[in-house]
Structures are given as C-alpha cells and as structure tokens.
Image (spheres, rainbow, N blue to C red):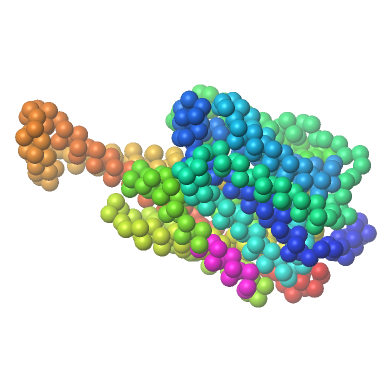
Amino acid sequence: MSETAETTNIEWKPKNSPWLICIPTILAGFMFVLDSTIANVALPHMAGTFSASREESTWILTCYLVASGITVPTVDWFCKLLGRKNFFMLSLIIFTLASFCCGIADSLAAMLIARGIQGFGGGGILPICQAVMLESFPKEKRGQAMAVFGLVVIIAPIIGPVIGGWITDNLNWPWIFFINIPIGFIALYLAKTFLEDPPYAKRQKNVKLDYWGFIFLITWIVSLQIVLDKGNNVDWFNTTWICQLFTVSCISALLFFISQIRNKESLIDISIFKDRNYFIGTFVQVIMMAVLLASLAILPQFLQIMMGYSAYLSGLSIMPRGLGSLTATIICGLISDKVDNRILLIIGLFLVGIAGFSLGFLNLNIASVNIAIPNFVFGFGMGLSFIPVIALSVVTLNNSQMTNASGVQNLLKNIGGAIGTSLASTMITRFSQIHQSYLVDNLTPLNSVFTERLNVIWGALSQYTSFDFANYMAQYSIYGSLVKQATLFGFMETFRICGLACFAVIPFIFLLKGISKKDEKET
C-alpha cells in the first residue's frame, strides 16, 4: 500500500456515529445468521408439504450454505466492482425477495432455487457487517463493537431453532421466511441513510473477474459440502462416488489457492495470512465454529432421540446457552477495553471445554437443570472467547484490508462449521457402534445379571403370549436398552471431544499479539 493510501486509511472517520452505523449491519447480519438454523426444526413440515423424504429436505439447508459459502470470499471483489454500500444494499434486496420466494414455494425444486438465491444474496452480508463495525469504531473501542457483533454470530444460531419451532407450531413454516421481509426493508432503508464508503471501499474502475478462480471456488465449495452432508449416510470413503467427489474437492481447492497466489486480479488476497495474529486468530475461530455448530446439531438430537423431547422443547432447552452468550457479550463490552483480550479468550475457551466435558457425563435420568447449567456455561464461554478473538485477529491489519480479511475468515469459518457438524454425526455413529460391540459381550447366559433380567421380563410377558414369543420379546427389549445405552455413550464421547478441542487451542493464544496502547493511539 502506498503512503498516501495509508494516510487516507488512518485519517478517515465515518460522518455518522458508529452506533448508528451498527443498526442496519446488525439487523442484516442477525437476519442472515438466524436463517442458517431457523429452518432446521421445520424440515419435517416442509418435507410433508413437498411430499419429499427427510433426506431430500436436508438440501433446503445445504443449498443455503453452499450458495452463501460461494459468495463470502468474493465480497471484496464485488465491493470493488459496485462499491461496498451498493453491494450491501443489493445483497439485502436479493436476500429479502428470495425469502418471500421461499415462503410461497410450492415444490421442493422451487424451494431449493429460492434458498440458493437467498444464500447468494446473504453471503456478503456478514463479512461486510464485520468489516464495517471494525472500521467504524476506533481500535480502543473495538471490544465494544465486537461485543455487539457477538449478538449476531453466537446468539442468532442458538435462538434460531427456538424461534423456528414456535413459528412452525403456532403459525406455519412459511412464516419463518416471511418475517425477513419487514426486517430486510428496514435494514435497507437504514443502510441507505447511515452507511458510507471509505475511500478504499468505493467503486473502482477496470475491475476484472478472476474467472478461473471463481470456477475453482464453486467446484471446491459445492463438492465439499455434498461430501460433508452425505458422507455419513453412505459410509464415507467406502463409497466410490464420495471418494471421487472428495478428490475433485481437494484438487479444486488446491487450484483455487494456486490461482489466487499467481493471479494479480484475484478474488481474494491471501497475503493476509502472513500476519501472525490473523492466521492464528482465524484458526482458533474455525475450531470454535466447528465446536459451536457441532454441539448445536447434536444436542437437540440427544434431547429428542434419547430424552423424548419435542422439537420445540429441545430448542427451548438450548436457550440458557443464548442467555450465557448475552451475559458474556455485555461483560465483554464493559471490560474488553480494560482487560487483555487474550486473558478473556483463554478463560472463555476453558469454560467451553468444561461445559463440553460436563455434557459428556450425562445420563438418561437427568433433570432439566443438568442441561441448563452446562449450556449456560457453554454460551458464556463462547461469548467470552469469540468477541476477543475477532478483535485480536485483525488488530495488526489496516482498515483497507478488513473487507477481504472478513470475507476469507467467514469462508473458513463456514467450512469449519460444516466439517464440525459432519464429524459430530460420524463420531456419534462410530462411537455408538464401538460401545455396542463392547456391551453386547455381556448378553450371554454366563452373565447372571443378564439371565436374571431376561427371566423377569420373560415371566412378565409370558402371561400375555406364548413362551417362545415372550422369550423373543424379552431379548428384544434388553437389546433395545443396550442400543440406547450405546447411543448415549456415542453422544457423550462426542461432547467430550468438543470440550477437548477447545482445550487444545488454548496454547495458540500465547502466540497472539495483544492490543497495545500504541495500537490505540494510531486511531
């Protein structure tokens, strides 16, 4: 960057108050993130409406994630082509209109197309939201800015299933999309009123598209998402087409990054990874996003499959996590500018790890409080760690790098979340099989406990049916209990690994550069 550009970058300040600028970006970001999870609990209802199977209905989620994943790394290029404010407003318009199309869809094909367009429109919202908030606030106030941003990235996906469940039960599933329409237009009006483009984010002339990079990106993201979504259902790499598709994904990813290094007019600038804080901070965020989305995916399954909760109650049981995150964001907003953010990050990761291990020692006789307390601690830890790590990851970057850095960071976090969710499902399946193979060894005539239990059930059932059929039903009942216990162990092991992953990244925090007084005076 030239000296003139650097001076412009340092001296530029928005005309409006940063808190006014926050309003449209937070509204738009919250709406986008909420839609990534709000449809989860409504999938059975959608499948019934479209006469589709449960597996087919999951493409409603996949299309949204794939489309937004493709858009995220292209945000910087679109901002140069259209200007950041114009691109942000265009994204809002596309997202809002696509939400309406989702609500009126009368077939699975129409829904998938609408969700894909919705994802394309929304993919640019979150990176711009993060970049605008980081640029608008001075460095010494970025802790407060990221505390507000934490409401988007942490709380929105947590309360999504709760809101979706309530709307689906009390209204109808199309309303989970229709509620975006007034919010979208309000955010659009506020964006037009308060947002402005700094000199380095204005529309540029002679902007060229990296066609090959874009093709490699689409191939990489689409193939990887399909592998992650469908791999567990078809036994992963024991299936030929999964191996082939994964190979295509790996080659496309390699070619994409090679093209970004060699092409001067690339979609993204990967030179930002030379910055140690950005590299380590992004890595930590990827792990945290994997843990967050994995736990959000498997905890409702545990409550519904193992505990017999309804979809709405299982979503409601996760609410303490949202309360914990909200509490943490308030605390971070008050003390993050006075306390070393690395300390907050370490404490937050430690709390998430503790909560993961706490969830890993549950049983089938637990009370609601046994779910609520670890969830609150989990949410509190996430809020206490996510906010500082975002601020730390960009503290050594210039404002002109924020849009590109946010786009790349959100792309990798999306991939991390998808991988975490798929790994969690796979681990539950594999660990359940392992524990089942161990437990089944106890179902032998040589085990007096098994024999005694079998005879009790056999005797009770033989009063209502034949002895042979009663014997069969008694064995089936015991085997059913064994499978349930093995599945419980599968969930518990997965929760513990989520906690262990958070402990494992704590040493990397000591490699991060803190936000010094010198950094604050630069603004």
* Quarter of the figure that contains the C terminus: bottom right
The residue sitting at 36% across, 47% down in the picture is 309
Task: Using the rendered image of the protein, determine whether residue 293 is visible from the camera's viewpoint.
Answer: no
Q: Position of residue 459 (x, y in %)?
A: 6, 38
In the image, 48 versus 475, the foreground residue is: 48
- In the displayed structure, 285 sits above or below 173; it is below
Please identify the dominant SS of the magenta region: helix
* Quarter of the figure that contains the N terminus: bottom right
Q: Position of residue 210 (x, y in %)?
A: 80, 35
Residue at the extreme top of the image, as rendered: 240
Q: Is residue 303 magenta?
A: no
- Residue 207 located left or right of residue 411: right
For residue 68, which quarter of the picture? top right
- In the displayed structure, 341 sits above or below 371; it is below
Task: Using the rendered image of the protein, determine whether residue 183 is visible from the camera's viewpoint.
Answer: yes
The number of callouts visible is 0
The residue sitting at 75% across, 49% down in the picture is 188
- Residue 263 located left or right of residue 342: right
Q: Does the magenta stretch include residue 332?
A: yes
- In the displayed structure, 230 sits above or below 10; it is above
The residue sitting at 56% across, 41% down in the picture is 175
Q: Position of residue 197 (x, y in %)?
A: 84, 54
For residue 130, which quarter of the picture? bottom right
In the image, 182 versus 23, the foreground residue is: 182
Task: State which region is magenta.
Answer: 324-335
The residue sitting at 61% across, 27% down in the picture is 110
In the image, 179 versus 400, the foreground residue is: 179
Q: Position of residue 96 (x, y in %)?
A: 68, 41
